[in-house]
Structure formats: structure tokens, C-alpha cells
Image (spheres, coloured by chain):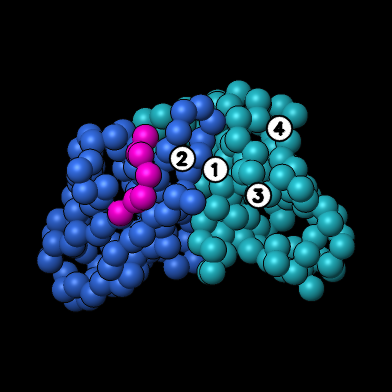
Amino acid sequence: GQQVEQSPASLVLQEGENAELQCTYSTTLNSMQWFYQRPGGRLVSLLYSPSWAEQRGGRLTSSAASNESRSSLHISSSQITDSGTYLCAMERGTGGYKVVFGSGTRLLVSP
Amino acid sequence: DAGVTQTPRHEVAEKGQTIILKCEPVSGHNDLFWYRQTKIQGLELLSYFRSKSLMEDGGAFKDRFKAEMLNSSFSTLKIQPTEPKDSAVYLCASSPTKNQDTQYFGPGTRLLVL
């Protein structure tokens, strides 16, 4: 079946550094969405990207490379409060909502 | 305006029991989602409603899982009968519409099946 792989599995940054999180997928993409979860906290939607469209929100940018079946989330000027788990979700197909989630990237931003 | 609320926050069930989880979406939202989150499987979609109509029933979860949305402000997820492998956090989310819009998540119900 379709799979979504996220990399890296974990990432440690110094505050102020930039991060690039990646999702690769094995089937035709309708859209990609990124979510964030702090330990013990609620899931939060970050960005929604229809196929191949770049999306921006504050210090976040999501982009997709259709020829590489890959989507990226860029975090610029990371802050300690960015620490947590980032999940990507791939939506495929037409009609309904057929979504597959990646296993997540754990980000730790240290002072 | 209240966010998505879920009750109970924690539930412990014996194998074979029937449990019902509840969700109240954000007022005015058209779409409602039920997800399951475990350490091993990660996040999985169970059901998706648009304007109270079931649009996605989660395929593999059909047999023992049934989500209903009797009105626009309330949804339930019934698991019958429960099995230990159902132990997970069950999340409810709502959004104005699925496309282009943010999903707002509830705090989740942590279910333990013994």
C-alpha cells in the first residue's frame, strides 16, 4: 500500500538554526499537510499544500518536488518552542479523505 | 469560542466491552474527523464526516468501529467489542472544510483495554 516516510526521525538544533524536514511518498499525491505536536499537547495543523504548491506561514514553508515524490517543511530561525514532533500527512485519490500519516520527526531545539 | 472537546479524557475497559467516545466540534465547522494514535502505528484516520454525512469510514476499522454524527454539534465513536489492541489515544478534529483549512484537534481520549 501507499507509504509516507519521514526523515530525519529526530533532529537536534541550536536555537536560531534552520531545519528541513522531509516526507517521501510512494503514490500520486493530491495534497500534503503538516502537523505539530508538543509532548502531552494537542495536535496542531501547520500548513496545507495542494499538489506542488508552496505554502508559507510565519517561519514555516512547505514545498513539494513532484519529480522526486518528496515534500519538505522548512523551519527558519528555530526557537526552543519549536521543539516537538512534526507529522506529515499525504492525501491521495479523489473523493472522501484517504490520508496516510508519516511516523514523525522529533525536533529538539536547544539554547 | 470553545475548541473541540472530547469526553471522557481517560477510559479503561475490559476486553469485549462496548465503549462510546464523544466529541463536540467547533461550532459552525462542517467537517469532523476521528483518528487513532499509537506509538507503533502512529496516526490513522478512522472516520471523516462532511456536513454530518460519512465520507470516509477508515476501511480496516469498519468491523468494530462505528462513528456517528447525529447532529452538527456532536459525534460519537463506538468500539464494540473492544480488544487490547484498541488501546490508543483517540482524537477528534473539526475544520470549516477539509480543503485549504486548518483542522482543530481535541485533547483526545486515552483508552486502555485490559
Start and end of the magenta stretch? A24-30
Circle 3 Cα neighbour tier, 10 Å, few/some/many (<14 / 14–19 / ≥20) = few
Chain under disc 3: B
The disc labelled 2 sits on which kind of residue?
Gln
As helix, strand or loop, the secondary structure at mark 1 comes to strand
For the stretch drawn in magenta, the main secondary structure is: loop
As helix, strand or loop, the secondary structure at mark 2 comes to loop
Q: A64 or B39, which lies in front?
A: A64
Q: Residue at x 54, y 69 (%)?
A: B40
Dot 4 or dot 2, earlier in sequence: 4
Q: Residue at x 71, y 32 (%)?
A: B69
Q: Quadrant of residue B82?
A: bottom right
Chain under disc 1: B
Report whether A101 appears left or right of A16: right
Give how far apart the Cα atoms at labels 4 and 3 are: 20 Å
Measured along the vertical axis of the image, is residue B53 above or below residue B8? above
Residue B67 placement (x, y as % from top left): 71, 40
Report whether A56 appears left or right of A86: left
The disc labelled 3 sits on which kind of residue?
Ala
Count of number-bearing discs: 4
As drawn, the chain in cyan is B
Q: Which residue is identified by label 2?
A: B103
Q: Which residue is identified by label 1?
A: B93
As helix, strand or loop, the secondary structure at mark 4 comes to strand
Q: B50 or A65, which lies in front?
A: A65
Q: Quadrant of residue A81?
A: bottom left
Q: Which residue is identified by label 4?
A: B69
Instruction: Assess whether mark 2 and mark 1 are in contact (beta carbons under 8 angstroms).
Output: yes
Asked whether the residues under marks 1 and 2 belong to the same chain, the reply is yes
